[in-house]
Image (tube, grey):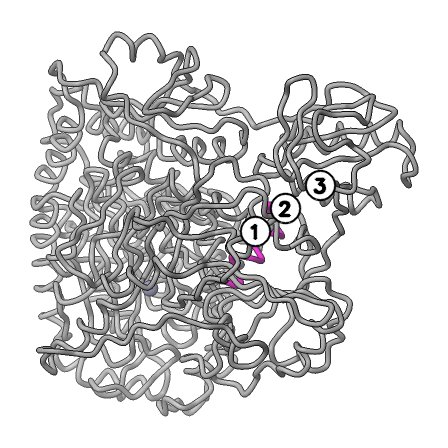
Amino acid sequence: MKKLFFILAPLFCLNGQVQMDYYLNDMSQYNSSIPTPESVIGHKVGEFHVSHDKLSHYVQELSKSSKRVKLIERGKTYENRTSWLMIITSESNQSNLEEIRQQHLRLSDSKNIDIDTSSMPIVVYQGFSVHGDEPSGSNASLLLMYHLLASDSNETKELLDNTIILLDPSFNPDGLQRFSQWANMNKNQSLNPDPSDREYNQYWPRGRTNHYWFDLNRDMLPNQLPETNAKIETFTEWMPNILTDHHEMGTNSSFFFQPGVPERKNPLISDLNQALTKEIGTYHEDALNKIGSLYYSEESYDDFFFGKASTYPDANGSIGILFEQGSSRGHIQESDNGILTFPFTIKNQLTTAFSTLNAAKNMRVKLLNYMKDFHDNQVELSSKPNENIVFGKQKDKSTVFHLAKVLKSHKIKFNTLSQDVKLNGTTYSKNNSYIIPLNQPKRTLIRAMFDTQTTFNDSLFYDVSAWTFPLAFNVNYSMTNGLSKSSVEKIKSNEVDILENIVGSVDKKSEYAYIFEPHDYYAQAAVYELLKKGLRVKTATRTFAINGENFDFGTYMVSVQNQSLDSDEIYKLLVEVSSKTGINVKSQSTGITDGIDLGSNNFEIVKEPKIGLIVGEGVRSYDAGEIWHLLDTRFNIPITKLDVSDLSYIDLSRYTHIILPDYSEGYQYQSTGGSINKDQINEYIEDGGNLIAYRNSVKWVSSNLSKVDFHTNEITADDVTFSERQSFFGAQQTGGAIFNSIIDKSHPVNFGIESNTLPLFRNSNVYMTKSEQSFNNPIVYSSNPLMSGYISEENLSLLKKATPFKVIRSGKGKILLMTDNTNFRAFWFGTNRILLNMLFHSNIM
Ligand SMILES: [Zn+2]
């Protein structure tokens, strides 16, 4: 009978409608007082794509109807949508939920070694559609929630007695809303499976990402975005035993469940973890067999990058599981597996959501014990060497704060320093450093953030091959292995309970001038506020000293006389701005210094940037979104988003800077004819504009504006078979690795960087040749540049000869080229300064 449903499903669906019994087996024991999805959202599940607004409505109505659920609002997205969490369990468990949670958390606190797990409920976190245009998950969640609250079968009751279900119906509310609008607005009443229909071909930036075009399924470890903040909060508050993440993949694929490719497993993940993942997989196997659905496992995807929701749990004594369903991407589409209907994709997701719960019920004690044993192993009770990581910076407090905030959000414990300490030649000041003991339950998670890796079993990666946090934040870090246990105890002060925001100050009012160094992450947020108020700000192109205190390249100076504000107003403004941005401003009563004086021509003017950001077809939306997010949310600098297809109608002369994020003509997803008119951009630059071109845009510049010389990888296949060709090409991809560079601190592009070296994140294969003049190569890769991650030998040898940054003068303007990504995924704090310097100091480059 069930097989019949599967075969006939496409026929039913051609009319766009299936009944609930297509999805749910035995509906005889459903409580009629629980509202069905259709009674609230106004259509059958699968008939239209549910919008987040309607889903929110249903979640709220459901929670009013049943005592099995507790609804939690965990914050808002950038578009002000709610990140909901439904905690679903039996009525009796609901009545002592907090007690159950506290008891469950003891499993991950290794001091409690005697816990009886035999009668404890298991905790399962089920999340859906983190990619907005992979909607079958969220649509399936409507039925899952309904079933769990409405079913009065013994099976459901037994499940709820033994399970706490943390159900997040939409990991990406803004993306789900965006895609549902697209799919519904293009839906035909007579459903049309032709893949060329507009319904299946979204326009830029598509529905995958969140408001600022981030891939939310890369943010679990960095935890920089509000949607992830909600997820991590739930995860750390509950420490679930299983987390499932329901996605979609290409239309011609069937269904995938983890484990992924065994050879690509992160070395921090145990074989036992993968064996348990595989055992849970047998439940999906059974359930999918029963409905006649094709699937596969272990042949693609991987558990390598902990930024993904299905891998993060594996560093926490939990099991993360990725599901990927072939996407109908609209309501019905032709595929290699026949006509693929939206209801069928929903049914597969629902089926594996149920098989997950079934596995959890049957493997409950095993998984609870696994979590306990995992955390027991994190802490060494023996007298082994006392391992700790110390990290910090000399001056930039905001960046250290942001890294500490990430640790705090994952409930990693760390302490302040009681005194300054020197480790491996680096001095850590007690005012701006922390010490993390590795001997704590989060040991593996800490290592997932701080370890580097340069050798690998496999040269293929589903995502980046490196993300080492202290390198991304460009903070100093050292192990304390060289110290005795007692010296470590001496430098370790209190554990950090509450992390205080960084507040800056002005030392006193001046009638002459104020100066502040450029090192703090937010220095240019302060500068921008001052420029916006019409103040004249200058920057030092030489170092100098005052009363023995040194001031670095790029130090900012605001003189008091001849400004648009009087001295009282300037003081008031600086007090306000410094408090907000964390910078410390020093007042000066004389223009004389040891070195350049405050009236010197070596103080150069800083101009307020007016920024245009090119977006649209051909531009990689992730890169554009990273820049938009950085300037808009962290620096409060408005940017104008200029769409490629509108560009020819726009007067570019009102922008001092135009940023071209990673751009290629003939981009793989390009579906409209928009392309950039090179004459227009050339004219803009000749007239004095600044073009900032990132990554592949450098190649576009070379072909269209000004020739750039490149080193290229000429490797040809030798002894590579036809079936190996993908691995051969894949091995030459630089999917994301970290390289060390040596910087010329006197060049304005490097102003404010404390260190003499700078770790760079590179996810491209564009290798510009160096300039003949050394002073035109302010950033060069070090002789042994690979710090962490994978790069092929061939590419590494090109990289060593290349430069990531170049300035080309053209007419009255400039082209600034950067092949590496300085703004990666909102957590590469260490190189954001490079973009800010291009915007604030291009006039002196
Ligand atoms: Zn996905």
In percent of width and height, residue 663 lies at 50, 73
Label 3 element class: strand
> Mark 3 or mark 1, which has the lower sequence index?
3
- Other-residue count near label 1 (Cα within 10 Å), few / some / many at <14 / 14–19 / ≥20: many
Q: Earlier in the sequence, mark 2 or mark 3?
A: 3
Identify the image quadrant of the C terminus. Answer: bottom right
Crowding at dot 2, Cα within 10 Å, few <14 / some 14-19 / many 20+, comes out as: many
Determine which residue is flagged by label 3. Answer: 539
- Does the image show residue 287? yes
Which amino acid is tagged 2? Answer: Phe
Q: Which residue is mark 2?
A: 635
Expressed as whole percent of the image width and height from the top left, the position of residue 707 reads 53, 77
The quadrant holding residue 715 is: bottom left
Split into 4 quadrants, where in the image is the N terminus? bottom left
Q: Quadrant of ligand 1?
A: bottom left
Residue 600: x, y in percent? 79, 37
Rendered position, 131 above or below 721: above
- On the picture, is 163 further left or further right than 289? right
Q: Give the residue type that dot 3 points to.
A: Thr
Q: Are marks 2 and 3 in contact (CB under 8 Å)?
A: no
Badge nearest the viewer, 3 or 1? 3
Badge 3 density bin: few <14, some 14–19, many ≥20, Cα 10 Å: many
The magenta stretch is 623-634
Q: Position of residue 387 (x, y in %)?
A: 23, 22
Instruction: Answer yes or no: disc 1 within 8 Å of ligand 1.
Output: no
Q: Which residue is mark 1?
A: 630
Characterize the magenta stretch by its predominant secondary structure.
helix
Pick whichever, 196 or 87, lies toward us: 196
Q: Residue at x 50, y 44 (%)?
A: 75
